[in-house]
Image (cartoon, grey):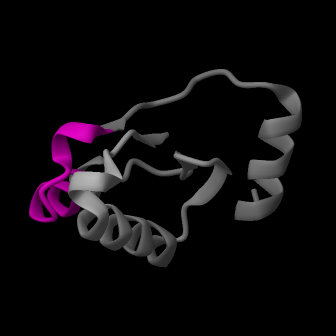
Amino acid sequence: LVASDIPTKEHRTGADLLRRKIKQMGLFLLQRTLWFYPYNPSGEIEFIANHYGVGRYVTVMEVTRMDKDDEIKLKKFFGL
């Protein structure tokens, strides 16, 4: 799970660039600032977020349990 709460007033460009890269990587947007990926993206996400100056507003987490309906959506999206 990649979660972000970037103050776009001060960091609009960094937020937009990070979002674009996350989409290019193929992460699944479950909610406005919650992106899921079936593999560990922490190294790349942390590097990119820091490069764009928004690293302190981005968190990468490993999820071990989730709502069944969300789990079905993710598995379908990633073909798992």
Quarter residue 7 falls in: top left
| Residue 3 in the image: above or below residue 25 | above
Q: Which secondary structure class fits the magenta region best?
A: helix
Q: Please give the range of residues in magenta.
A: 46-58
Where does residue 43 sit, x and y in percent of width and height? 22, 52
| Residue 24 in the image: above or below residue 60 | below
- The count of marks equals 0
Judge left or right: residue 26 versus residue 79: left
Judge left or right: residue 48 versus residue 78: left
Instruction: Identify the residue at the far front of this view.
Output: 9
Q: Which residue is at a point 33% across and 65% down the rendered structure image?
A: 18
| Residue 39 in the image: above or below residue 24 | above
Instruction: Identify the residue at the far top of this view.
Output: 65
Q: Nearer the viewer, residue 8 or 22?
A: 8
Q: Is residue 51 magenta?
A: yes
Where does residue 26 sit, x and y in percent of width and height? 54, 70
Judge left or right: residue 35 versus residue 57: right
Judge left or right: residue 46 versus residue 8: left
Q: Which residue is at a point 37% across and 69% down the rendered structure image?
A: 16
Q: Nearer the viewer, residue 70 or 31?
A: 31
Q: Which residue is at a point 63% across and 58% down the rendered structure image?
A: 28
Q: Is residue 68 magenta?
A: no
Where does residue 35 sit, x and y in percent of width and height? 54, 50
Placement of the C terminus among the 4 image quadrants? bottom right
Q: Which residue is at a point 86% across and 29% down the rendered structure image?
A: 68
